[in-house]
Image: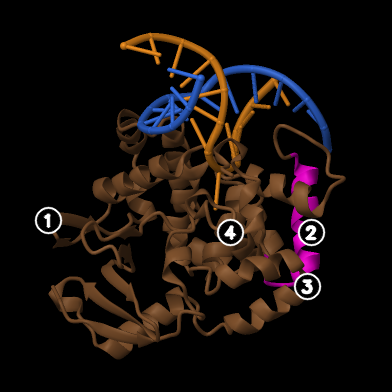
Chain colours: A brown, B blue, C orange
Amino acid sequence: MNGNWFKLLCSKKELQLEGTLNGGQSFRWKKHPQKHEQWIGVFLNKLWILEQKDDCIMYQVHEKKSQIQNEKYYNQLLKNYFQLNLDLRKHYSDWSESDQYFKDAAKQFYGIRILQQDVTENIFSFICSSNNHISRITSMVEKLAQFYGDEICQYDGQTYHSFPTVNSLAPASVEQKLRTNGFGYRAKYISKSAQYIVDKGGEDWLEKLKEMDYTHDRKALMALTGVGAKVADCISLMSLGHLESVPVDTHVYQIAKRLYMHKLPTTKTVTDKIYSQIGDYFRQLYGPYAGWAQTVLFCADLKKFQGNNIEISEAKNPKKMRS
DNA sequence: CGCCTACCTACCCG
DNA sequence: ACGGGTAGGTAGG
């Protein structure tokens, strides 16, 4: 294990940890139970402790002794994970020019980044996300790691596990185990999808998706049981590098209709046609990084940011509105 | 296409 | 205290 603090130079404007780690992209980050300014999370089979400073991120890495590397190496991993090569301020400026709502939201929600996530984790986490609460999704993802992942280390009295491989989710026993642990119908989705991916060639097949274009791998992903349009778009955006992908959930639909597309028909669930209309609208508005822009915009609308003075955040929970 | 229903479960709210 | 409604959808008809 390793308790050293390392330093990654990076301004708050370029990367805001709070909005990025707590924005519903990854379900593996939490605040340190005692030290609330620190974030604890797992990726690349390592436990990371991150703390935002004015001009840098201070961090620790905990992993097996045999794998310990130096600061330069870890900095590179973080740069990849947060996609720091992308000039975010430039894009914010472009998106602000295209859209006044974005411009308003951007003032407060600066530094929101799309994480470059692991494909396997992304697929199975978002299969869990359908028709579900964040808190329950989080506990399901934790269980997957606990049951089928590898132990990484102990930290602060907790044992941390890596996210499981596709192979480890494929055995026939998995569905029943997940069922008895509260996964509901998603147990079958996970098991069937893991088996399907293994049949196709496992993680190698998933890596090949990154070389395909958005339209094609979206179609490939939707062949997985439990992966529909929205989940496929989340995966395309968050782990396959297709930044034009715009995941449309019921919430995005509500806001799109209210603020941008008044003529959109009123329906209980988002139909295929409405879904593609909304995606196309935002792609036309923001360009090839539409999914990223849209993530920033709707970050302003999440419950956890309620009480903040952004106009967009008012629509979401009329019941809870004050003043 | 659009519409309908079932699907697991934990948590919220009346 | 108990029970219906709902949560970042999806599959199947």
The image shows residue A318, relative to residue A67, as above or below, that is: above
Using the image, name the chain to which the residue with label 4 belongs.
Answer: A
Q: Please provide the residue range marked out in magenta.
A: A271-290
Q: Of marks 2 and 4, which one's residue comes earlier in the chain?
A: 2
Spatial separation of the CA atoms under disc 3 and disc 4: 22 Å
| Residue under label 1 | A157
Q: Amino acid at mark 2?
A: Asp
| Residue under label 3 | A98
Q: Of marks 1 and 2, which one's residue comes earlier in the chain?
A: 1
User: x%, y% of residue A30?
Assistant: 33, 57
Q: Amino acid at mark 4?
A: Asn
Q: Farthest right residue? A: A263
Task: Give the residue displayed 33% in from the left and 30% down from the top.
Answer: A176
User: x%, y% of residue A154?
Assistant: 14, 61
- Left or right of A43, for residue A64: left
Task: Give the residue displayed 17% in from the left and 81% down from the top.
Answer: A4
Circles 2 and 4: CB distance less than 8 Å?
Answer: no
* Mark number displayed over residue A186: none
Circles 2 and 3: CB distance less than 8 Å?
Answer: no
* Mark number displayed over residue A280: 2
* Mark number displayed over residue A309: 4
Task: Give the residue displayed 43% in from the left and 81% down from the top.
Answer: A79
- Left or right of A62, for residue A263: right
Our reading of the magenta stretch's main secondary structure is helix
Q: Of marks 3 and 4, which one's residue comes earlier in the chain?
A: 3
Asked if residue A148 lies in the magenta stretch, the reply is no
Q: Amino acid at mark 3?
A: Ser
Give the label, 2 or 3, closer to the camera: 3
Specify the quadrant of the image occupied by residue A280. Answer: bottom right
